Image: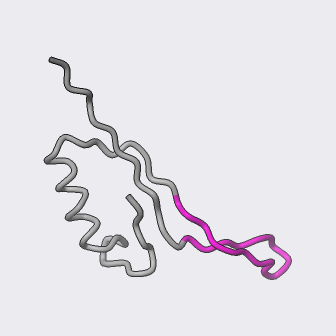
Amino acid sequence: MYIDARYPSESWMPEDVNIKFDEFGREGWELIKVVPKLKGGFYAFFMGWITLTVGYTAYFKRALETS
């Protein structure tokens, strides 16, 4: 699932993402990892490269059902 970071809420996550995470949880999915998507970069004040987080990719897993 991709999360756009440009539209934060009080929790710094879009409300629709929180709703979607809750929905996935009810369906048996478990959030295992969130990876930031970085964009660009520039050299600032001779301190080094600065990148901007423009979004996140969330990874989920669900236990396999056995018969």
Identify the residue at horizontal 42%, vertical 72% (top origin): 4
Q: Quadrant of residue 57?
A: bottom left
Dividing the image into 4 quarters, which one contains the C terminus?
top left
Dividing the image into 4 quarters, which one contains the N terminus?
bottom left
Image label count: 0
Span of residues in magenta: 36-53
Q: Quadrant of residue 20?
A: bottom left
Image check: 54 left or right of 34? right
Q: Residue furthest front?
A: 67
Q: Is residue 27 above or below residue 3?
A: above
**Position of residue 53 measured from the top left corner of the image (x, y, whole percent):** 55, 70
| Closer-to-camera residue (11/19) | 19
**Position of residue 9 measured from the top left corner of the image (x, y, whole percent):** 31, 78
Image colouring: one colour
Q: Name the dominant secondary structure of the magenta segment.
A: strand
Q: Residue furthest right?
A: 46
Identify the residue at horizontal 39%, vertical 81% (top origin): 7
